[in-house]
Image: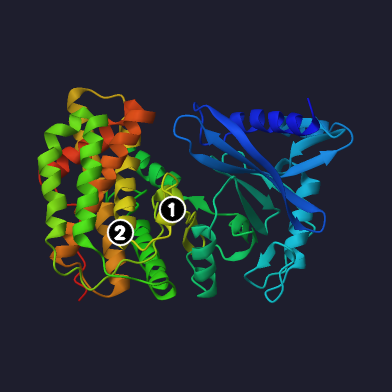
């Protein structure tokens, strides 16, 4: 076996077992392995695969650290041996990551350093050590001390990465609801990595919401607004933050009219396809389709056009810091093609994603509670109370920030987007986590029965 064949075989085995590999269970062949020069002696490796079931190709990035002797300290990241050297996944190697950080530091706003570009003036801490985050699913994140965080994109697609595009615009606008983008690695129309401020003391929004719901159920005789862990204030502030981000994105990128008949048609098509995967949806199909058909008949959506949005917004994409809420991960919905993720869309899609996340937070805790039939009814009531309280608070914050109250047409739009999101969730849970499918199905039952999600108390005019 030649060195090239050995390398290809080793990379195939490594990618197959990697946490971030999105093609698990699918047969594929390696059709190309190439090294991409970045700066000085730095390079990264791109492995292109072709899947047997549909002929789709996908490129994955594996930066290499090569040594003449085995390195026990990173043995867990061993890729293979070829060309008389031992090769490791470089994100696990502090010496390699130090060189990446130094390359970022060598770039300036006016002059890139090879493929390393700077987007903000910031003196990087070159004395810091790198730490790889172990929980990443689709990318790899490396913290440099308490100063900066690098996200290395594992699946690489030709064209601008939305996370870099949007964060650069928000950083340039000095928006306070994101971690500023310090720079990125880009070469040959590929975005390979990005560097931003490390929010060291931030708390995950999903975790905070779960803590609030646990506190709710621990106080059996109190309403959602009476418990010490009431989350409504945070939901209101989060609504303000999302609205501010949407305002900046509307100014920073091209907008276009929202094609409501096309939106309605796409929602109906997703619903019909979902019925084939989740047969229980059939009984709600007609009622949900009416929700979507109502969108096509809207003649005025408050003059709000389609614009760049987050695209995959939920509590897990938020961080709470001492300075307020931050939004993270602007790549959009991973399953969508890159070109589609970069298209203008309705900001109500982001809003709906957050409202569904509130529902998931309380139901995720409630489903694990041991209860009698009578207690279960009380838990369901209190869960709904928590969801509605935080929904109202979030929407109040959102509309107060934008300065105009929700119109009836926008109420209908938000409800349709919430239903569309729940249909997606029902399909996802059926395929990946069947024991959780009751959460989106319960929401769809309520929506089919006429429940409106878009409720506010704000009198903003």
Residue 198: image x %, image y %?
Answer: 61, 57
Q: Which mark is residue 394?
A: 2
Left or right of 150, for residue 106? right
Residue 153: image x %, image y %?
Answer: 59, 49
Q: Nearer the viewer, residue 286 or 265?
A: 265
The answer to whether residue 83 of the structure is visible from this angle is: yes
SS class, disc 2: helix
Left or right of 176, for residue 351? left
Quarter of the figure with the N terminus: top right
Quarter of the figure with the C terminus: bottom left
The answer to whether residue 223 of the structure is visible from this angle is: no
Left or right of 442, for residue 57? right
Residue 75: image x %, image y %?
Answer: 77, 30
Disc 2 versus disc 1: distance between alpha carbons? Answer: 21 Å
Q: Nearer the viewer, residue 95 or 18?
A: 18
Q: Residues within 10 Å of mark 1 (few under 14, many from 20)?
A: many
SS class, disc 1: loop
Residue 110: image x %, image y %?
Answer: 69, 77
When asked about the image quadrant of residue 348, the answer is bottom left
Name which of mark 2 and mark 1 comes first in the sequence: 1
Residue pictured at 41% horizontal, 67% vertical: 245
Total residue callouts: 2
Are the two marked residues, 2 and 1, in contact with CB atoms closer than 8 angstroms? no
Q: Which residue carries the number 1 mark?
A: 332
Residue pictured at 49% horizontal, 71% vertical: 175
Q: Is residue 143 above or below residue 372?
A: below
Residue pictured at 18% horizontal, 24% vertical: 373
């Amino acid at each position: 076996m030649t060195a090239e064949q050995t390398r290809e075989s080793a990379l195939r085995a490594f990618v197959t077992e990697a946490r971030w590999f999105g093609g698990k269970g699918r047969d594929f062949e390696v059709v190309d392995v190439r090294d991409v020069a970045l700066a000085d002696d730095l390079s990264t490796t791109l492995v292109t695969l072709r899947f047997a079931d549909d002929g789709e190709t996908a490129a994955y990035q594996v930066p290499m650290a090569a040594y003449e002797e085995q390195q026990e300290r990173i043995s867990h990241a061993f890729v293979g041996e070829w060309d008389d050297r031992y090769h490791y996944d470089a994100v696990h190697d502090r010496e390699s990551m130090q060189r990446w950080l130094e390359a970022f530091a060598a770039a300036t706003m006016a002059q890139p350093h090879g493929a390393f570009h700077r987007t903000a003036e910031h003196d990087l801490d070159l004395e810091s050590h790198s730490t790889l985050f172990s929980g990443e699913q689709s990318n790899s994140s490396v913290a440099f001390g308490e100063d900066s965080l690098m996200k290395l994109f594992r699946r690489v697609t030709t064209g601008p990465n939305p996370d870099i595009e949007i964060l650069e615009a928000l950083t340039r606008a000095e928006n306070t609801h994101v971690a500023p983008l310090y720079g990125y690695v880009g070469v040959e129309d590929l975005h390979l990595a990005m560097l931003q401020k490390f929010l060291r003391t931030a708390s995950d929004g999903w975790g905070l919401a779960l803590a609030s719901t646990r506190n709710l159920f621990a106080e059996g005789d109190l309403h959602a607004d009476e418990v010490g862990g009431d989350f409504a204030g945070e939901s209101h502030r989060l609504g303000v933050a999302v609205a501010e981000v949407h305002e900046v994105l509307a100014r920073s990128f091209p907008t276009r009219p929202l094609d409501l008949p096309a939106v309605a048609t796409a929602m109906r098509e997703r619903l019909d396809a979902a019925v084939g995967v989740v047969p229980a949806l059939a009984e709600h199909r007609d009622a949900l389709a009416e929700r979507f058909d109502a969108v096509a008949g809207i003649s005025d959506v408050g003059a709000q056009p389609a614009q760049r949005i987050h695209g995959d917004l939920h509590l897990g994409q938020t961080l709470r810091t001492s300075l307020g809420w931050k939004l993270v991960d602007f790549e959009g919905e991973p399953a969508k093609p890159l070109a589609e993720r970069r298209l203008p869309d309705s900001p109500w899609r982001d809003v709906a994603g957050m409202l569904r996340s509130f529902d998931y937070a309380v139901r995720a805790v409630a489903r694990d509670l041991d209860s009698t039939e009578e207690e279960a009814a009380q838990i369901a009531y209190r869960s709904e109370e928590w969801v509605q309280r935080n929904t109202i608070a979030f929407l109040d914050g959102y509309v107060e920030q934008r300065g105009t109250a929700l119109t009836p047409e926008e109420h209908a739009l938000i409800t349709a987007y919430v239903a569309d999101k729940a249909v997606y969730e029902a399909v996802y849970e059926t395929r990946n986590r069947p024991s959780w499918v009751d959460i989106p199905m319960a929401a769809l039952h309520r929506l089919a029965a006429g429940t409106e999600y878009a409720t506010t108390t704000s009198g903003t005019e």
